[in-house]
Image: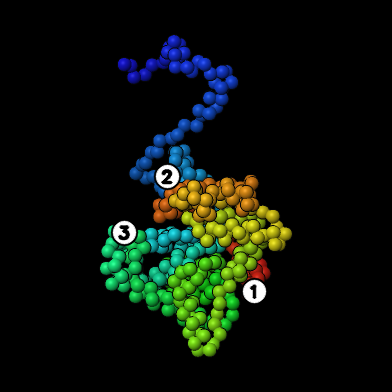
Amino acid sequence: MPKNRDFDEKEYASLGYAKLSQQNQELRKEVLVNRVKQLELKKDTTVAELVSNMADMSIQARNIGRCAEVLKNIYEDPERPTVFLGLAGPLIAAGLRRVIRDLVVSGAVDVIVSTGAIIYQDIYASFGFGHYKGTPSSDDAGLFDLNIDRIYDTYIDEEKVARTDRFCKLVADEMDPANYSSRAYLDKLAERLEDPESILYQCHKLGVPVFVPALNDSSIGIGLTEHRVRSQEAGKPGIAIDSIRDNAELVQIVVKSPKTAAFYVAGGVPKNYINDSIVMSYIYGVDRGHDYALQITTAVTADGGLSSSTLSEGLSWGKISKKARYAMAWVEPSVSLPLLAGYISGKELTKDRPRLKFEWDNDQLKCLKTI
């Protein structure tokens, strides 16, 4: 049988294609325009080139490419959107600490909203305490007997965890008794760190506010609980974390920003808080949604949960602007975040991007400006 030949008219008619109306034939031509491009990998292909080329592929590769396009639009926008980075999942255990830290140092991130576990793992690592290769099929009862904790296929040292908990407690002991936002407390923790590889250290140094709205839902919360109990036993006042202050501080950042962009790594509480900071802007008479948004996750949309809710669903709540550029990719963050971070770095998207300066008076954001 010939490998390549044109159908003759009888063969064409027998397949039914000739039955298409003239209008549908024209529509068909319009639909079959953009070919999927087959990925070519060369010896010198960069991460940025790889991610750019993914936009012409299919399935989740195309979605990664779309996320990259949103990032390009964010950093090329002359109105300089404030970028909120939402972090959830075992990112430090996965080996992404330096990737996140470099996003901060490069100026790609203006505000971080994170789970407590991620910031805690960063503090743990800042003392030189390690994460070790393990296996998800471990003898967990045996690990318990060895004072070793497991995070999927990663081990951490429970004895070092206890020391890190203690550090969180001791810093609280030194603070003046009062209510604090998570940002204010975390900044005090950061002052004590001496590790330039630390995310929290660099955020403090560069003036990037870090919020952990569910701070009590982490080992940092364990240290703070010990602080409270010991303070009560000694008949002394202690500090308290006021999560509503987080709300109030975040919404002030939103209303003082000309535009906003949300970069969600996984979902969880950080995603919801960043979204709610937009919704709450009505308190200041502002009606807006995020101008840009992207999310990388593996959460399934069928369960109706917030972590997996699509960004288009957020349009119905006003969390995402009707005119927003947005994209989602269902790719586990230990794979997808390095790709997108490599794209930002390789394209030098933040090379000349000015930083933001936040001037706080207690929980009041007095000034937000570029420097």
Quadrant showing the N terminus: top left
Residue 168 vertical placement versus 317 (above, below): below
Foreground disc of the pair 2, 1:
1
Name the one closer to the observer, 55 or 79: 55
Looking at the picture, how far across and down is residue 364, in whole percent? Answer: 65, 71
Residue at position x 34%, y 68% in the image: 149
Query: Which residue corresponds to mark 2?
Result: 50
Lower sequence index among marks 3 and 2: 2
Q: Quadrant of residue 53?
A: top left
Name the spot of residue 26 as percent of width and height, x first.
56, 22
Disc 2 from disc 1: Cα separation: 45 Å
Q: Residue furthest top?
A: 10
> Which mark is drawn over residue 267?
none
Please state which of residues 312 and 111 is positioned toward the viewer in this rendering.
Answer: 312
Identify the amino acid type marked 2.
Answer: Leu
The residue nearer to you, when weighing 331 against 360, is 331
Give left or right: position of 303 versus 126.
Answer: right
Point out the tag, 1 or 3, that comes first from the N-terminus. 3
Residue, disc 3: 136
**Residue pictured at 55% horizontal, 70% vertical:** 183
Q: Is residue 238 left or right of residue 359?
A: left
Residue 94 at x, y = what percent? 38, 59
Q: Secondary structure at mark 2?
A: helix
Residue furthest out toward the right: 285
Q: Which residue is mark 1?
A: 361
